């Protein structure tokens, strides 16, 4: 139940869930996970870590597949970083704009623990012709439903990073948030943490990434 110290979250959309942190209650450096905003384009997939695998392919010397235990056995790093939806504050736009009408709470700071994306890329051996790393999540759906621009069918949420950002110290594959395993809505079992970039680059529920030799235009 909400209290004066922990007021209720603001539901901006029920399905898929898009939930705003009550920004006026900000009182600490880190936002508790249960108060952290949720931004979903598609429904949150229900993944079983026992079956989940991370596949790495494309312009690499050695395509690989890793389970969650193998990733957790690697050298871990903890990185405290802010993630913010690019549409945060949209309710204040003049003239009004389409999209979720966020006030100020589509932003949060957390301590993320995982492995450097660079170290997994090194395991696979990135070819010299590579230019980007395309991250893809398990969530999918139709974009722009009932509009002329609608996708021809369900597509996965995917976002690419330039190779220099993918190998930076500020880019990790996180399995923990504020010292606890990721929750379903926050990307369990693995999500991207891309320090300094807006939330659309922080792909959740990652199942595979592909090293590409041409810029991704999706």
Image (spheres, rainbow, N blue to C red):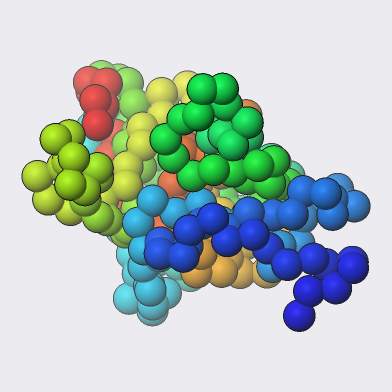
Residue 144 as seen in the image, left or right of residue 124: left
Q: Tell which of 172 and 14 is nearer to you.
A: 14
x and y, in percent, of residue 78 in the image:
70, 50
The residue positioned farthest toward the front in the image shown: 95
Residue 107 as seen in the image, left or right of residue 124: right
Residue shown at 22% from the left, 20% from the top? 214
- Can you tell which quarter of the image residue 140 is in? bottom left
Look at the picture and state if 161 lies above or below 184. above
x and y, in percent, of residue 163 in the image:
41, 25
- Can you tell which quarter of the image residue 1 is in? bottom right
x and y, in percent, of residue 126 in the image:
33, 31
- Can you tell which quarter of the image residue 183 is in? bottom right
Q: Tell which of 92 and 87 is nearer to you.
A: 92
Residue shown at 36% from the left, 32% from the top? 160
Residue shown at 29% from the left, 34% from the top? 211
Look at the picture and state if 41 lies above or below 5. above
Query: Does the rendering let one see residue 51?
Result: yes
x and y, in percent, of residue 206 in the image:
39, 54
Please identify the quadrant where the C terminus is shown: top left
Residue 50 as seen in the image, left or right of residue 127: right
Look at the picture and state if 157 lies above or below 92. below
Q: Tell which of 61 and 139 is nearer to you.
A: 139
Query: Does the rendering let one see residue 84?
Result: no
Residue shown at 58% from the left, 65% from the top? 182
Q: How many marks?
A: 0
Residue 106 as seen in the image, left or right of residue 190: right
């Amino acid at each position: 139940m909400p209290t004066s110290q922990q007021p209720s979250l603001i539901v901006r959309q029920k399905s898929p869930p898009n939930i705003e942190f009550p920004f006026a209650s900000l009182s600490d450096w880190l936002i508790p996970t249960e108060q952290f905003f949720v931004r979903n384009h598609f429904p949150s997939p229900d993944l079983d870590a026992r079956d989940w695998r991370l596949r790495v392919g494309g312009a690499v010397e050695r395509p690989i597949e890793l389970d969650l235990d193998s990733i957790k056995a690697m050298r871990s790093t903890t990185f405290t970083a802010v993630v913010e939806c690019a549409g945060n504050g949209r309710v204040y736009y003049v003239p009004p704009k389409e999209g979720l009408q966020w006030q100020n709470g589509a932003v949060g700071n957390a301590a993320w623990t995982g492995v450097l994306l660079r170290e997994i890329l090194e395991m696979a051996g990135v070819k010299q012709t590579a230019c980007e790393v395309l991250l893809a999540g398990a969530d999918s759906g139709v974009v722009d439903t009932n509009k002329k621009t609608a996708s021809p069918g369900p597509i996965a949420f995917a976002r690419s990073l330039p190779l220099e950002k993918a190998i930076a110290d500020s880019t990790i594959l996180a399995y923990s948030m504020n010292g606890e395993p990721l929750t379903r809505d926050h990307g369990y079992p693995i999500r991207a943490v891309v320090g300094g970039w807006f939330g659309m680059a922080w792909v959740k529920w990652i199942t595979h990434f592909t090293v590409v030799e041409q810029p991704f235009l999706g």
